[in-house]
Amino acid sequence: MRTNGVRCLLMGGQACVFYGAAEFSRDLDLVILPDEGSLETLRRGLVALDAALIAIPRLDGAVLDRGHAVHFRCRAPGVEGLRIDLMARMRGVAPFAELWERRTTIETNGALVDLLSLPDLVQAKKTQRDKDWPMIRRLVEQSWYSATEPTAAAVTFWLRELRTPGLLIQAARQHPDAAAGCHRDAVQLALAGDLSGLEAALQAEESAERAADRAYWEPLKRELEQLRLGWRTSG
């Protein structure tokens, strides 16, 4: 992708590995810009990987811009069987231009890899899938434990996203001024040391996000079924 000039950001399980919250994944999840120029460079990258479309919908900017994912399987030597999942828009996640501006770039084995920033990756993980919520917790915990001199931005991130009750109580007590100005119910309960209330608030947050994600995907699932029906009819 980099060789062909594709502007894309790594997300999903492999991005979690880079942030120190390991999650085994055979897939390569990328967020891309869905304009025609970007898609043209993307197509060159997919050709180089001998990547074949494996599901509906087809690669199309308008389809990606509505929030659908497009799926490919690579056949080139060295990457045989690698699945690539492409998205351009996700629920609650900023547009690509903003994601690109605050991306994280990591060098590995002499190559540069562009990732979603940690806050954006956490936001993208707030889905209805069971496996995503333990990963959110690990990602934010890793940020907490690896910080030596926390910045104001890091404190804001922890207060907004920590899902470990004990750590959230600790963060609120260590940064009382920031916590007092935070509108998150869980933070106020953490300040009060109300462990049972805090645990209930965290569960309510997760339930609300799962419900919002189901509601977001419902019309997209109906649209995808129509696309499949049209493909079967035309085929």
Image (tube, rainbow, N blue to C red):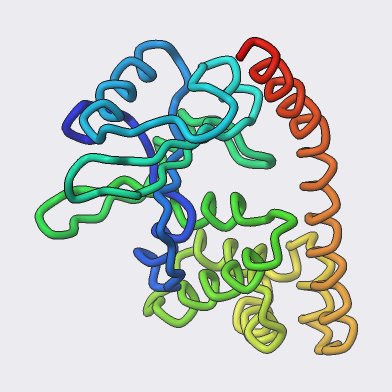
Q: Residue at x 41, y 42 (%)?
A: 84
Eyeballing the image, is 52 above or below 128? Answer: above
Eyeballing the image, is 233 above or below 176? Answer: above
Q: 11 or 74, which lies in front?
A: 74
Residue 80 image position (x, y, % from top left): 27, 48
| Res. 149 image quadrant | bottom left
Numbered label tally? 0
Eyeballing the image, is 191 above or below 25? Answer: below
Is 230 left, or right, of 109 in this rendering?
right
Q: Residue at x 40, y 59 (%)?
A: 26
Quadrant of the image for the C terminus? top right
Considering every residue shown, the one lying at the far left of the view is 110
Residue 144 image position (x, y, % from top left): 49, 77
Q: Residue at x 33, y 30 (%)?
A: 7
Q: Residue at x 53, y 31 (%)?
A: 88
| Res. 163 image quadrant | bottom right
| Res. 39 image quadrant | top left
Quadrant of the image for the N terminus? top left
Residue 82 image position (x, y, % from top left): 35, 49
Q: 232 or 51, which lies in front?
A: 232
Q: 28 or 166, which lies in front?
A: 28
Is 136 left, or right, of 142 in this rendering?
right
Eyeballing the image, is 36 above or below 69? Answer: above
Residue 172 image position (x, y, % from top left): 68, 79
